[in-house]
Amino acid sequence: MPKSAKPAKGNAIIGQSGGPTAVINQSLVGVVQALHDFPAIRKIYGMRHGVNGLTRGDVVDLTKVKDKKLELVAASPSAALGSSRDKPDAEYCAKILEQCKALDIRSFFYIGGNDSSDTARIVGELADASGYEMHCLHVPKTVDNDLMGNDHTPGFPSAARFVATAFMADSLDNRSLPGVKINVVMGRNAGFLTGASALARELNGDPDGGPHLIYLPEVPFDTDKFVADVQAVYDRLGRCQVAVSEGVQTLAGTPLLTTLFAGQTDAHGNVQLSGTGALGDALAELVKARVQPRSGGGKLRVRADTFGYLQRSWPYPSPIDAKEARAAGKHAVKLAAKGTHSGSVTINRAKGKTYKAELGVQDLKNVAAKTRHMPAEYIEGTTGVSKAFLEYLRPLVGGMAEVGVL
Amino acid sequence: MPKSAKPAKGNAIIGQSGGPTAVINQSLVGVVQALHDFPAIRKIYGMRHGVNGLTRGDVVDLTKVKDKKLELVAASPSAALGSSRDKPDAEYCAKILEQCKALDIRSFFYIGGNDSSDTARIVGELADASGYEMHCLHVPKTVDNDLMGNDHTPGFPSAARFVATAFMADSLDNRSLPGVKINVVMGRNAGFLTGASALARELNGDPDGGPHLIYLPEVPFDTDKFVADVQAVYDRLGRCQVAVSEGVQTLAGTPLLTTLFAGQTDAHGNVQLSGTGALGDALAELVKARVQPRSGGGKLRVRADTFGYLQRSWPYPSPIDAKEARAAGKHAVKLAAKGTHSGSVTINRAKGKTYKAELGVQDLKNVAAKTRHMPAEYIEGTTGVSKAFLEYLRPLVGGMAEVGVL
């Protein structure tokens, strides 16, 4: 458990990091509003582009921002303070701490994924080592849903809602003009978001609706099997809608895309998976070359869409996600106020028949730079997700458009 | 003007054709509901996959489908009867007419774009020539908004709403993690949909928000100028969001994509522009190779998204579009009931301060196989749209999410 310390007081700073989401500003506003309600806090600073801006002294004073403005920001997708892909090492974190000391920061709030929690961890440890009293709280955020110690993380339910809606609509499109349709979904290491496509089957009012095949990064991807899978569905239905995670890996454990595409890497040394249609196009070419059309059916119609950044930025979030993201931000302040020295806010599911979230805290070490994968009980066979996963997912995404077919 | 004839009676048939939209089922339901209210009509048939199904006798009886079911279908994106990309010639149309005679069809309703109106025209002329009394009415539909004789066409406002929302959200994402972001938008020949991205600037609450550059198919695309345009915006703002029509053409008048990509062609002999990320990826490579990062700013971050089929199938349409699409379907039946022998329903804007649509009819010849482009007064310079275009567009898309930045 996180060390206990004196309640926070003095100045506070907040930053946003990693890929933005539809609700990361809800968490920002949650922190700011809770700090507003907390008389021991004097100044509230915001980092421009996370710790990248902070090290350059690029901060903004949020102490007196009005609630009306904050509510507008909360409803906006993407990181209103700007985000950063930097992954600070000890030297970088020493600079962060130096700036914190210069601003007399005694509470450090950082909203982000596992890399961001690692930053909070290092900065906190450096502060401790130098005898500087500072609370370091991490607020979870990631559309990939891959943080340890959480039932789910803010940002994921909204992205899942987008993906399920998109597959529902696209399945009806594919029913209108049949063929093979491949949709590439975000999720570098974890298949939660790609798996969310399965929810479309309950929505599209079509007993034969897609997605018919789901390829998760947790299940090794074999191109021969992929071609056979698509052929079998196509032979049966005359169409096939496929969900593929951008992070699918070959049997040898290398990302499929790296075998096809010498891409750009980000500051973490990761290959660029998003912001390119390369994987979808390569799989479409594979299908065109190797899947046989129906006899007399002419040329096979094959299309690929890569859903891209809209998955994380679509401005109509899951209502529950928006609420929980706000609550997670407020909870971080509550923890600091009660004397929690450092930690990462958690969201877990309360026991009971109806869905209810329970906020908590875990050690930064439990979440920092680790990756949670889809548990085995959420995966079914090699191209599907289980009922248990759909039950897990359903309450998170909220109600959706009702549709029907003739 | 369309020839006047006796009021329609007997059996009716309806089909959907071309790329589906978010509201093409509204028009379908408009036709069916109006036929239900029209006692002279006996049987109502639906073509499966347009005239392709009809020639094979694949029709469905819609005479007794209940209103509750129809309303669910109306709210669903994509063509509930199935669609077709066939472009029938005289021989094909003779088969269509043969099937119509076999089913004693006296009213032929076809929902689609300019190719579909050409089918209605040929079938109608063949019927006339053989002395077979049949009303042939075309109901307009296309997200490209490229039909002659209309202020706009059903399907376009909903797609424009999706594109504007997507650019708004993506601009905030690009503000969070700055770089060059290229988004490819549908529209083979007309730039209306790509131009709709400009509406995002009024929405994203960011005075420096995107799209910063808009490339329409009506304006010749020059790669050197494109690189210089991006460089200039990037130098000024440290980021650049670009809207590119999938149909942009080189100075020589060939689609940019055909110079980069030996793609699949559809039944009309058109090159495949949608369902591939090729154009966006090629432009991203161009920017990576030729646009200079800021001094000391490290590697330039360049991403491309191709919005793909979600533009035409997103199941949350513009409310006005949904209403007008329904009304257009009903109007076609009203025309037949009043004795209009053949024609294409039109939507034009009534004079006056507040937006109001006026339904009418035009000769099939005026719309068949012709393409309407963005008028010159809607285009500003080589990378923008005019205020007049935004004024034209605003009432069509409806109210959207309110957002703000810090």
Image: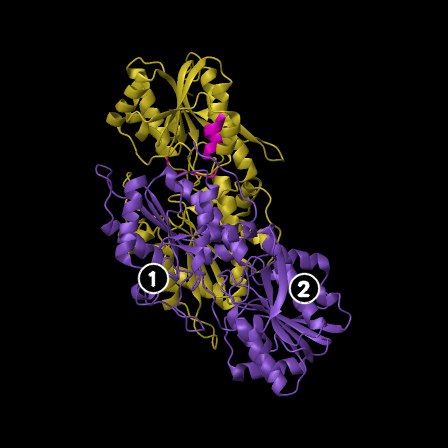
Chain colours: A yellow, B purple
Q: Is residue B123 left or right of residue B388?
A: right
Q: State the quadrant of the C terminus of chain A.
A: bottom right
In the rendered image, residue B62, in percent from the top left (x then y), is placed at 69, 68
Q: Nearest the camera: A14 or B256? A: B256
Is B76 rendered above or below residue A217?
Answer: below
Residue at image x 68%, y 82%? B133
Between A336 and A294, which is closer to the camera in this rendering? A336
Give me the chain letter of mark 1.
B
Which amino acid type corresponds to the residue marked 2 in the rendered image? Lys
Eye-nearest disc, 1 or 2: 1
To the question of a shared chain for discs 1 and 2, the answer is: yes
Which quadrant holds residue B264?
bottom left
**Chain containing the residue with disc 2:** B
Q: Look at mark 2 in the image and give the residue it sits on.
A: B330
Q: Is residue A147 above or below residue B57?
A: above
Q: Residue at x 62, y 69 (%)?
A: B361
Image check: B1 left or right of A161? right
Query: Residue A66's x, y, as percent?
Result: 50, 24
Q: Residue furthest right?
A: B39
Name the quadrant containing residue A41: top left
- The mark total stands at 2
Mark 1 lies on residue: B220
Query: Which corner quadrant holds the N terminus of chain A?
Result: top left
User: In the rendered image of this protein, does residue A302 appear above or below residue B134?
Assistant: above
Secondary structure state at the residue bearing disc 2: helix
Tell me the magenta residue range: A18-30
Observer able to see residue B288: yes
- Closest to the observer, B60 or B219: B219
Disc 2: CA contacts within 10 A as few (<14), some (14-19) or many (>=20): many
